[in-house]
Image (cartoon, rainbow, N blue to C red):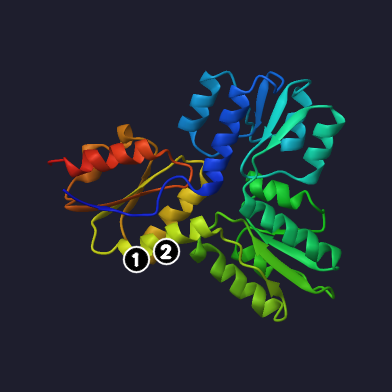
Amino acid sequence: MKVVSISPRGYCPGVVNAINMVNRVIRDPEYPRPIYLLGMIVHNQQVMDRFQEKGVIALEDSGLTRLKMLDSIQSGTVIITAHGAGDDVFTKIREKGLRFVDATCKEVYKTHDLVKKYLLSGYQVLYIGKANHPETEGIISLDPAIILIENERNARELVKTKKPVFVTNQTTLSIKEIEPIISIIKTQFPYATIAEEICSSTRVRQEAIIRLNQGVDLCVVVGDPRSNNTASLVKISREATHTRTIRISTLRELTPDLLKGVQTVSVTSGASTPTEITNAVIHFLENYEA
C-alpha cells in the first residue's frame, strides 16, 4: 500500500514543554507529594496513563471546572495543563498554600493577554470556542462579560452593542471552522477588531493536510477522541480535501474493513499524539497487503 506521510505531525512545542515539565516534577523530590494534574496535561490517554503509572493523580471530570477540582486537593503539587486556566484558579491555589507548576502553552497565554488588554480598554470581547473545553473555560473565567460563540447560530443571535468589539478564538480550532463565524460577525459588527489566534503548530498541520492530501483513498488521523486539534484535522481533511477520513487512537483500531479498496493512504496525527503510535500505524500500512 502506498503511504503518504503528512508532516509536520505529532507533538507541538507546547505539548513537548508540558510533558517535560511533568517529568521534571516527578524526578524532583523537592516538589511536595502527591502530584496532581488539574485535568489532562494534554488530550491523549496514552500520555496520561504513563504519568499515572508513575503515581501522578489526574483530576478529570467533565462536570467540574478547574476551580472546583481544587476543592479535593489539600496538599501537594498542582500542575496546570497546557490548555491553561483562569486567574481565579491561580488565586485559589495560592490561598490554599499549594505548590504549583504552570505548563500553559505560550500560544494560550498570548490569547489570555490579548483578551485582558481589550477588556481593560472597554471592548466587548467575543470568543469563538468550544464550551467545556479547558482552554475556553480559562478564557471565559477572565470576565463574565465575555460572550462565547460556538457556532454560526450564536454569531447570528448577537445583540448590538455600543462598545467596540474584539473577536478572538480557541487556538486549536480549524481554519474552516472559524472563517464562517467571523464572516457573520463582520456583517454584524463591521468595525470589529479581529485577532485570529489559531496557533502556529495547529495551522501548519492543517495546511499540510490541504497541500498533501491529494489523490488518496483514505486519510488516517491518529489522535485521542478528546483532542480538539485532532478533531480539527479530521474536519479539514473531510471538508477541504473531500477525502474519506477516519480517526484512530492506536493501531488496534485500524481494522481490515476500514482498508478495503484502499490503494493510497495518507497519515497524520494530532499535536498531542506520541510519535511512536503514529509510526506504528505508518509501518503497518507500508507493509499491509489486502
Q: Residue furthest left?
A: 289
Q: Is residue 218 left or right of residue 67?
A: left
As drawn, 29 above or below 119: above
Distance between the Cα atoms at labels 1 and 2? 6 Å
x 70%, y 23%: residue: 31
x 72%, y 64%: residue: 126
As drawn, 96 above or below 112: above
For disc 1, the marked residue is 211
Q: Is residue 57 visible?
A: no
Answer whether labels 1 and 2 touch (C-beta < 8 Å).
Answer: yes
- Of residues 176 and 14, the one nearer the viewer is 14
Q: Is residue 34 left or right of residue 257?
A: right
- Of residues 217 and 2, the one nearer the viewer is 2
Which numbered circle lies on residue 61?
none
Q: Is residue 90 visible?
A: yes
x 58%, y 39%: residue: 18
For disc 2, the marked residue is 207
- The x and y percentages for residue 57 are 62, 23
- Of residues 80 and 170, the one nearer the viewer is 80
Q: Quadrant of the C terminus?
A: top left
Quadrant hosting residue 279: top left
x 44%, y 47%: residue: 270
* Local SS, label 2: helix
